[in-house]
Amino acid sequence: MIVGRRQTEKPIRWAMVGGGGTSQIGYVHRSAALRDRTFDLVAGAFDIDPERGRAFGVELGVAPERCHADYRALFAAEAARPDGVQAVSIATPNNTHYAIAKAALESGLHVVCEKPLCFSVAEAEELKRVAADKRKIVGVAYGYAGHQMIEQARAMVAAGELGDIRLVNLAFAHGFHSAAVEETNPATKWRVDPTFAGPSYVLGDLGTHPIYIAETIAPHLKIKRLLCARQSFVKSRAPLEDNAVTLMEYDNGAFGTVWCSAVNAGSMHGQKVRIVGAKASLEWWDERPNQLSFEVQDEPVRILERGMGYLARQATAEDRIGAGHPEGLFEAWANLYGRFAVAMEATDRGDRGRLANLRYPDIDAGVEGVRWVEACVRSAEAGGVWIDYR
């Protein structure tokens, strides 16, 4: 259990690209990274408008001379300093991720990147190659995966408490974009523009989250083939989808479904992960992240609660407060940022022992997210047909 001790020897000197004063996700990144002093925010290129970005950086406490006009200026200036940054987080529109991440890695920096990592598997594999060459980590912002009850679900599947896994039922389907809100909301506008968002909207923006959580809970399941159908119910969003359903066959015979939607009218968030085995099922809902439903056939439903002594050790390792007190999104993200920091420090030291059992959404998770979106789009564009996953 976390008791306030920093998990690294020193804070990682850290910068942000994007995440400026009007960015909701930028605030989440900063709150998570700075919570346990595993990172110190010392530089950045916070906004596409250099003056606005500089003013915001100064407001955050960053020295004016370290608030840069763009990522190229940031990486060049910091490389020339003996106390230059060691890592950067990328919180910019999707179309910029690949170029910024590659430049950061080539500058010798660790990277935390918003998802999707890039637009194509070829680009993702290139980032993986550069990261390996430079011996730097890439962390991907699958923030919900930091919730502790996901660790409990993983432990229970590994222990065989569900039996052979038969079904994986995933959803991330909210209703906040049931109308054309992008007409007045810039944060939504770029997400439905393929120039900025890439080949998909809800598949990449929403669907990759429960896909990664399912991979975390049941890592032995590998997608064999899939079929995807997608729709643009708000017609101005075409060719990007605001609703999609994907069917998946796994190599062990299990079957999966993914519903991702921004037009599920009335739904607040709608991210649920249900894993069904031969003996029992588990369900996790991100609107109630401190609970895990464990449903054994012919027995009463059991609701497992975060922080309790009956949970697996790994399900309490990052708890921030005792049972009964709710933990939420910021704690989940902070757990991941803590793991990112440990991975960065251990990688720089060549400490393979510390890296051996450290799990976080890494470059491979980023590659798989891009692969899943690419496959879904390929299936949908072919008329919703089954395609081999690899």
Image (tube, rainbow, N blue to C red):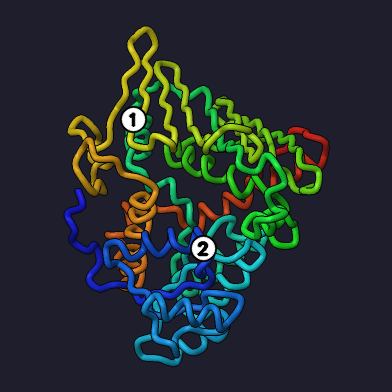
Mark toward the viewer: 1 or 2:
2
Vertical relation: 229 (above or below) 42 = above
Residue marked by disc 1: 156
Q: Residue 94 has which mark?
A: none
Image position, residue 111 (x, y; %) = 47, 68
Vertical relation: 172 (above or below) 134 = above
The quarter of the picture where residue 170 lies is top right
Image position, residue 5 (x, y; %) = 18, 61
Vertical relation: 172 (above or below) 143 = above
Crowding at mark 2 (Cα within 10 Å: few <14, some 14-19, many 20+): many
Q: CA distance from mark 1 to mark 2?
A: 30 Å
Please, what is the three-letter code of the amino acid marked with disc 2?
Cys
Tell me the element at label 1: helix
Residue name at image x 58 percent, y 66 percent: 92
Residue name at image x 65 percent, y 56 percent: 185
Residue marked by disc 2: 113
The quarter of the picture where residue 258 lies is top right
Q: Residue furthest front?
A: 184
Q: Quadrant of the C terminus?
A: top right
Residue name at image x 24 percent, y 42 percent: 316
Residue name at image x 52 percent, y 63 percent: 23
Residue in front for this viewpoint, 249 or 263: 263
Please, what is the three-letter code of the amino acid marked with disc 1?
Met
Image position, residue 138 (x, y; %) = 47, 64
Number of marks in picture:
2
Q: Earlier in the sequence, mark 1 or mark 2?
A: 2
- Mark 1 and 2 residues: CB-CB less than 8 Å, in contact? no
Tell me the element at label 2: strand
Residue 341 falls left or right of residue 68: left
Image position, residue 215 (x, y; %) = 48, 40
Vertical relation: 344 (above or below) 168 = below
